Image: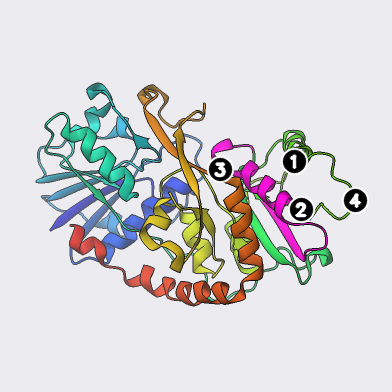
């Protein structure tokens, strides 16, 4: 079959990483792939590389795959099947017909999470739709991720020597990233006598005053603790120098022991998959799609609870009808899992062993053949 793929795979952000991963997986199939890049933001950083599939052209395409925001999806009657990858992060509930227009134009909608797949299919069935919702497995493009390298981001800091390093990558001020819960769990679980450290690595420049205020809020939530031994080490890097580079991110995966990523989103995170690739044993919500697919074999799962999406940070605000939910982490469970990660070397070794297989899996994965 001839397949035309349209997506933001040149963008240097999560949209770009995930789009490129899907395109890479499509290349592993037996079909002919043509690719066309789009940009979802006028100021997005982008890669200069050229996809070989961009030079491919056919007189006819059997399948059109669109990886983008719903408002930009189109119906094209010249192809036999139309697929929309809409990267949903939340669970839909009682969505009005007018907010599902683009989904209803597709023959198939692909989504990360089996939970979202089930709920969205129920919503579409209410309107007698023939649209099929498919849960697509985790994918990661490993071309730009070196296999043999050495980290050098933290080695110059002698205070971190011989410590078990938890680390967080993201925007600490974005509530849906779960940073506040991570910080509270860490402060409540460890003390200065534990040989641990928590590294905070903002992906881009953040307001240092706002970050300091948030950290103080987390600390003050512990109350007036007596004695000097309660505060474990927290180290904040790269708060004012701009975006965390790919090399710095990779170095952190290598030098760090455990990525903590309890984000509320139900979608697969390329950052989590990347960390697992470097044997980092990420801590994530059990409600997250990464955990739904692979579970405790590759990750540490924390208990989470379904909650309404109460946030002002929305990708497509006009589609929001107060009928969405996601999974928020249970702080007690997060702290318990962090403690277990620190003390249980046997379980760490089991997950590291499982994660050593991921690079080859991502290179050769042909599950998309069966989906197509």
Of the image marks 1 and 3, the number of the one nearer the N terminus: 3
Residue 111 to residue 272: above or below: above
Of the image marks 4 and 3, the number of the one nearer the N terminus: 3
Residue identifier under label 1: 215
Residue identifier under label 3: 177
Between residues 318 and 183, which one lies in front from this camera angle?
183
Residue identifier under label 2: 234
* In magenta segment, residue 175: yes
Numbered tag placed on residue 71 in the rendering? none
* Mark 3 and mark 2: Cα distance apart in space: 18 Å
Residue identifier under label 4: 227
Q: Secondary structure at mark 3?
A: helix
Of the image marks 4 and 1, the number of the one nearer the N terminus: 1
Mark 3 and mark 2 residues within 8 Å of each other at the beta carbon: no
In the picture provided, is 4 more to the left or to the right than 204?
left
* Residue 324 seen in the figure: yes
Of the image marks 4 and 2, the number of the one nearer the N terminus: 4
Between residues 199 and 63, which one lies in front from this camera angle?
199
Of the image marks 2 and 1, the number of the one nearer the N terminus: 1
* Mark 4 and mark 2: Cα distance apart in space: 18 Å
Q: Quadrant of residue 38?
A: top left
* Mark 4 and mark 3: Cα distance apart in space: 32 Å
In the picture provided, is 10 more to the left or to the right than 68?
right
Mark 1 and mark 3 residues within 8 Å of each other at the beta carbon: no
Residue 184 percent coordinates (x, y): 68, 45
Q: Secondary structure at mark 1?
A: helix
Which residue is found at the position 15% from the left and 53% from the top? 58
* Mark 4 and mark 1: Cα distance apart in space: 20 Å
Q: Which stretch appears magenta?
A: 173-200
Residue 168 percent coordinates (x, y): 63, 53
Mark 2 and mark 1 residues within 8 Å of each other at the beta carbon: yes
């Amino acid at each position: 079959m001839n397949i035309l793929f349209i997506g933001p795979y040149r963008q240097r952000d999560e949209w770009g990483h995930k789009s490129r991963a899907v395109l890479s997986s499509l290349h592993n199939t037996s079909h002919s792939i043509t690719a066309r890049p789009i940009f979802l933001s006028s100021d997005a950083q982008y890669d200069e590389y050229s996809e070989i599939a961009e030079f491919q052209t056919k007189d006819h395409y059997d399948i059109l795959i669109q990886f983008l925001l719903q408002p930009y999806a189109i119906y094209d009657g010249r192809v036999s099947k139309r697929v929309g990858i809409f990267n949903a992060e939340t669970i839909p509930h009682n969505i009005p017909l007018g907010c599902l227009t683009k989904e209803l134009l597709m023959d198939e909608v692909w989504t990360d999470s089996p939970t979202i797949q089930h709920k969205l299919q129920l919503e579409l069935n209410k309107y007698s739709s023939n649209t099929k919702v498919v849960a697509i497995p985790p994918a990661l493009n490993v071309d730009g991720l070196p296999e043999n390298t050495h980290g050098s981001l933290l080695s110059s800091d002698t205070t971190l020597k011989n410590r078990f390093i938890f680390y967080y990558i993201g925007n600490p001020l974005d509530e849906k990233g779960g940073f506040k819960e991570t910080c509270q769990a860490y402060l409540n679980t460890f003390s200065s006598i534990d040989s641990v450290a928590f590294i905070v690595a903002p992906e881009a420049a953040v307001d240092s005053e706002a970050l300091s205020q948030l950290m103080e809020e987390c600390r003050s939530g512990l109350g007036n603790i007596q004695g000097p031994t309660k505060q474990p080490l927290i180290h904040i890097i790269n708060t004012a120098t701009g975006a965390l580079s790919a090399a710095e991110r990779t170095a952190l995966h290598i030098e760090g022991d455990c990525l903590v990523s309890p984000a509320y989103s139900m979608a697969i995170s390329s950052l989590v998959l990347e960390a697992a690739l470097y044997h980092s044993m990420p801590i994530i919500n059990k409600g997250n799609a990464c955990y739904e697919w692979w579970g405790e074999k590759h990750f540490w799962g924390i208990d989470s609870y379904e909650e309404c999406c109460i946030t002002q940070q929305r990708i497509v605000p006009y589609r929001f009808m107060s009928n969405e939910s996601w999974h928020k982490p249970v702080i007690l469970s997060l702290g318990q899992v962090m403690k277990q990660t620190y003390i249980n070397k046997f379980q760490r070794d089991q997950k590291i062993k499982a994660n050593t297989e991921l690079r080859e899996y991502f290179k050769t994965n042909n599950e998309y053949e069966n989906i197509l």
